[in-house]
Image (tube, rainbow, N blue to C red):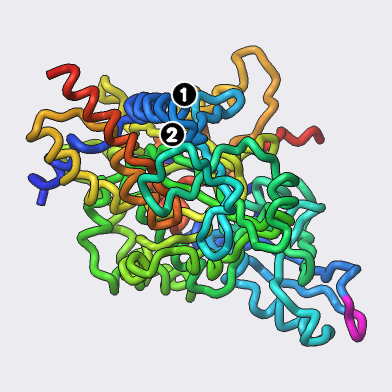
Amino acid sequence: MENRWIPIGRMTDDKDVLRDVWFGRIPTCFTLYQDEITEREAEPYYLLLPRISYLMLVTDKVKKHFQKVMRQEDVTEIWFEYEGTPLKWHFPIGLLFDLHASNTALPWNITVHFKNFPEKDLLHCPSKDVIEAHFMACVKEADALKHKSQVINEMQKKDHKQLWMGLQNDKFDQFWAINRKLMEYPPEDSGFRYIPFRIYQVTTERPFIQKLFRPVATNGQLNTLGDLLKEVCPAAITPEDGEKKNQVMVHGIEPMLETPVQWLSEHMSYPDNFLHISIIPQPTD
Amino acid sequence: MSLNLDTEDDFYLEENRFKQCCAEFIKHSQQIGDGWEWKSIKDFPDGYMSKTHFQMKNGNTPSIFKDSTKESDEQTFTHVEEALDDSQVAGICATSEVIRYEYHVLYSSSYEVPVLYFRACFLDGRPLTLDEIWEGVHECYRARLLEGPWDTITQQEHPLLGQPFFVLHPCRTNEFMAPVLANSQRENRNINYITSWLSIVGPVVGLNLPLSYAKLVSEQNTKTD
């Protein structure tokens, strides 16, 4: 399932790409942190996580499973960690995996905690409303970039709700019935006003790089992924005669650098309408 | 509909203008000892304006901080220069709950407006919860803030530091700034966007500006007339 190449540039039905992105899954094994106090031994819990969703939205069963072996009073706010790094639930799951674990063997091994919530690293998530608010804030920001917020502001509250419910209930058609409007642009233009994207690297304190970037150059040519990186994160590009040091990854694959960013934005954005791009070290095997 | 957007266009704050306004703002802050400073990010051209102040849980300034030689224009003049360090503050106010507020003004390129980020913690490092933050918001603002989910205070990751902060959502900024800016254009007055903006959003979260910021701008106007 991982490292599969989508033949961009061939006569692939673009709608297949949308479905492939939506239905991507990561086999995950959840293990309770050894210092948590349990009444009996906690078995690990296996789950297929949707790449496009958020940890706190899809782990109710995980919480219930471990609560069964713990005392009520020891169960406070759940949080997740991978190899010592607290996992930011407000990042989509696919982004977290690509960034931290894409070149390691499956299943993805996540550790579950109920104590010592890392206040300095993680946002609190007291209810699903917080996830919805975060998700909608991202959708809104993406539309500010694409359409000066015109499309999102013209929608009714029920349309916004439909986006959220589509994501929460894993309903591709319900979601895209509304989302397709956010992917349109005026016929006289060649694309969106600016492309909503964020570039992530584990090596920086700064959580991501986000800048204004137009999909079309002044000469009318479509800007590519390579053009985007050259402008925003030049260190990620392999020099002409140099060795490839990094992978530029979206949804577990490395799109060709010649891919137009307008196409990527329309087809490989996450449900929040952002392209979340990971720059990770090239594996050395 | 598109007509409105065109006129609102003139009032978006471009990034270089943002930096300029902050520089002027900080210059005045230094003159009056208001504690604002500019922080840069290593290896990037980005930066933000930052200020820290201390406040008692009941909303009063710890008495040691009130400077009797200064005129107190406003009763809510509660900020203080960070001349005392945390341990000195703790020693002075041992029996009271002192809260350390940190305010950051960042630029949002998505909305082309400034955004206010803030966090608060007790002196022992314990951060305030969202409920405790709400307690500090004046009643007259609470109802308005609760009207729309995108207008409320939410916890978010600081885009430059990567740590949890509270944020006043920026998507409506242009709505309330447009009339202020339109007015100043009509009257041929130059105003500092940051000063106007911060004087509107700041008080909502306990941040007040001394009146001298406004006096500074109008002095500049009379000089150029």
Within 10 Å of disc 2 (Cα), the crowding (few <14, some 14-19, many 20+) is some
Instruction: Identify which amino acid the numbered label 2 is placed on.
Output: Lys
Please state which of residues A111 and B173 is positioned toward the viewer in this rendering: B173
Residue B158 in percent (x, y) is at 55, 46
User: Tag 1's secondary structure?
Assistant: helix
Q: In the shown orientation, is residue A264 left or right of residue A217?
A: right
Q: Looking at this view, name the residue that lies furthest to the top.
A: A241
What residue is shown with label 1? Answer: A231
Q: Is residue A24 inside the magenta stretch?
A: no
Residue A254 in percent (x, y) is at 58, 39
Please state which of residues A114 and A93 is positioned toward the viewer in this rendering: A114
CA distance separating discs 1 and 2:
9 Å
What residue is shown with label 2? Answer: A211
Which of the image's four quarters has the C terminus of chain A?
A: top right
Which of the image's four quarters has the N terminus of chain A?
A: bottom right
Residue B148 in percent (x, y) is at 33, 67
Please state which of residues A149 and A284 is positioned toward the viewer in this rendering: A149
Chain letter, disc 2 residue: A
The number of numbered badges drawn on the structure is: 2
Residue A237 in percent (x, y) is at 58, 24
Residue A223 shows in this picture:
no
Instruction: Identify which amino acid the numbered label 1 is placed on.
Output: Glu
Residue B120 shows in this picture:
yes
Within 10 Å of disc 1 (Cα), the crowding (few <14, some 14-19, many 20+) is few
User: Tag 2's secondary structure?
Assistant: loop
Q: In the shown orientation, is residue A144 left or right of residue B157?
A: left
Residue range of the region highlighted in magenta in the rendering: A37-41
Q: Are marks 1 and 2 in contact (CB under 8 Å)?
A: yes
